[in-house]
Image (spheres, grey):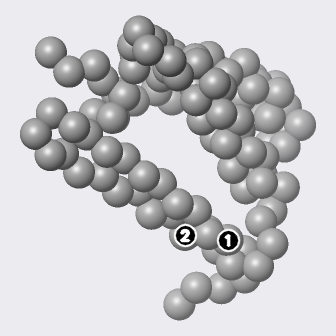
Amino acid sequence: MLKEGDCVLFDMGCVKGRYCSDMTRTWFCGQPTEKQAAVHDLVRRANEAAEALIKPGVRLCELDAAARRLRRRATARISTTVWGISSARPTTRRATSAARTPP
């Protein structure tokens, strides 16, 4: 049962031929906490940074790198102000198939 303060995240995608899609949607039950709002805003800004670079000739890995750079720079600031810790070590995981350039 969902309760006030819970966050529901749907992350889905599919592959059709050489086309890979990825979509994430987030809902908050009630108002998001300061931490939830900060993370949600960071993800939105990272997406916008990547989208601003889209044009013919720009490789998908360059878009992914731009979003990751913004996230790394912002993580330390968010960690200090929201979580109250002195340093942050963001985890990295392999880029999703949507962020890879096909062979």
Q: Position of residue 30 (x, y in %)?
A: 76, 79
Q: Residue furthest bottom?
A: 1
- Mark seen at residue 94: none
- On residue 8, the disc is 2
- Seen from the viewer's position, the closer of residues 75 and 103 is 103
To which quarter of the image does residue 74 belong? top right
- Vertical order, 54 against 28 (above or below): above
Q: Tag 2: residue type?
A: Val
Crowding at dot 2, Cα within 10 Å, few <14 / some 14-19 / many 20+, comes out as few
Does label 1 or label 2 sit earlier along the sequence?
2
For image coordinates 64% across by 40% down, the residue present is 43
Figure quadrant of residue 77: top right
Residue, disc 1: 28
Image position, residue 78 (x, y; %) = 80, 35
Lateral position of residue 64 relative to residue 35, left or right: left
Residue at image x 69%, y 49%?
40
Q: Give the farthest residue toward the front.
A: 56
Q: Is there CB contact under 8 Å for labels 1 and 2? A: yes
Q: Secondary structure at mark 1?
A: strand
Residue type at mark 1 is: Phe
Q: Can the viewer see residue 88 in this picture? A: no
Point 30% across, 23% down: residue: 100
Q: Residue shown at 89%/37% (left/top)?
A: 81
Mark 1 neighbour density, 10 Å: few (under 14) some (14–19) many (20 or more):
some
